[in-house]
Image (cartoon, rainbow, N blue to C red):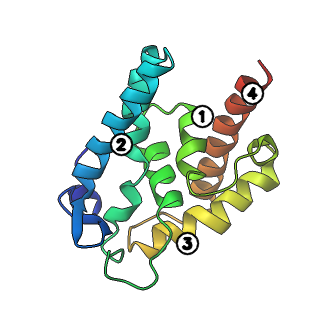
């Protein structure tokens, strides 16, 4: 994915700092993958390697927002921007969309309930502020918002079906 074409920073951006050690987002993604592979192997779950890769690749993409910086006291939320970019730029899996959206939040199946009000809430409360906060262009026409709401609704509906299986 060419994030620069979306007006975002690249994967060399510093995204994590602990004590005096800093890591780029690209390094963090690789570290998440390696740790996840070990955990998956220990639990006989390596068949999910492709999902691990997708989650690792997309979960922190919102940190490429030029307004997000490791040096800031307070940063714009990155999870919603990551989820929106995943939804808008991939053949999306609803479980992955939901895990990216909620990866710093409490997870429950109620949040995945695909009602139009819930979809409008996700769009209005999380995604639009995250996209606007990143200075990215999002077409806010009624038609486009309805398209995005339908995409969120469809994604959450597929997630709910997976939860119920």
What crowding class fits label 4: few (fewer than 14 Cα within 10 Å), some (14-19), or many (20 or more)?
Answer: few
Q: Which mark is residue 129?
A: 3
Residue 88 position (above or below residue 41): below
- Disc 4/disc 2 C-alpha distance (Å): 25 Å
Which dot marks residue 62? none
The location of residue 44, given as percent across then percent down, is 49, 14
Residue to which mark 4 is pinned: 163
Q: CA distance from mark 3 to mark 4?
A: 28 Å
| Residue 27 place in picture, x, y as percent | 22, 50
Relative to the observer, which residue lies in front, 97 or 31? 31
x, y percent for residue 159: 68, 32
Residue for point 44% across, 29% down: 39
Q: Residue at x 45, y 54 (%)?
A: 82
Is label 4 in contact with label 2 (beta carbons under 8 Å)?
no
Q: Left or right? Give the position of 155 relative to 134.
A: right
The answer to which image quadrant residue 73 occupies is: bottom left
Distance from the alpha carbon under mark 3 to that under mark 2: 27 Å
Q: Nearer the viewer, residue 132 or 146?
A: 132
SS label for mark 1: helix
Image point (40%, 45%), residue name: 58
**Label 2, label 1: how far apart the Cα atoms are:** 21 Å
Q: Nearer the viewer, residue 27 or 85?
A: 27
């Amino acid at each position: 994915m060419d994030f620069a074409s979306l007006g975002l920073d690249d994967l060399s951006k510093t995204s994590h700092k602990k004590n005096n050690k800093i890591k780029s987002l690209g390094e963090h993604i690789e570290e998440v993958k390696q740790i996840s592979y070990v955990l998956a192997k220990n639990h006989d779950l390596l068949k999910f390697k492709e999902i691990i890769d997708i989650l690792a690749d997309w979960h922190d993409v919102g940190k490429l927002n030029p307004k997000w910086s490791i040096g800031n006291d307070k940063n714009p939320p990155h999870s919603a921007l990551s989820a929106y970019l995943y939804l808008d730029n991939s053949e999306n899996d609803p479980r992955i969309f939901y895990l990216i959206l909620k990866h710093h939040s409490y997870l429950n199946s109620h949040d995945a309930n695909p009602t139009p009000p819930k979809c409008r809430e996700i769009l209005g409360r999380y995604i639009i502020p995250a996209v606007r906060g990143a200075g990215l262009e999002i077409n806010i026409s009624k038609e486009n918002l309805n398209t995005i709401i339908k995409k969120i609704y469809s994604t959450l509906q597929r997630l709910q079906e997976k939860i119920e299986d």
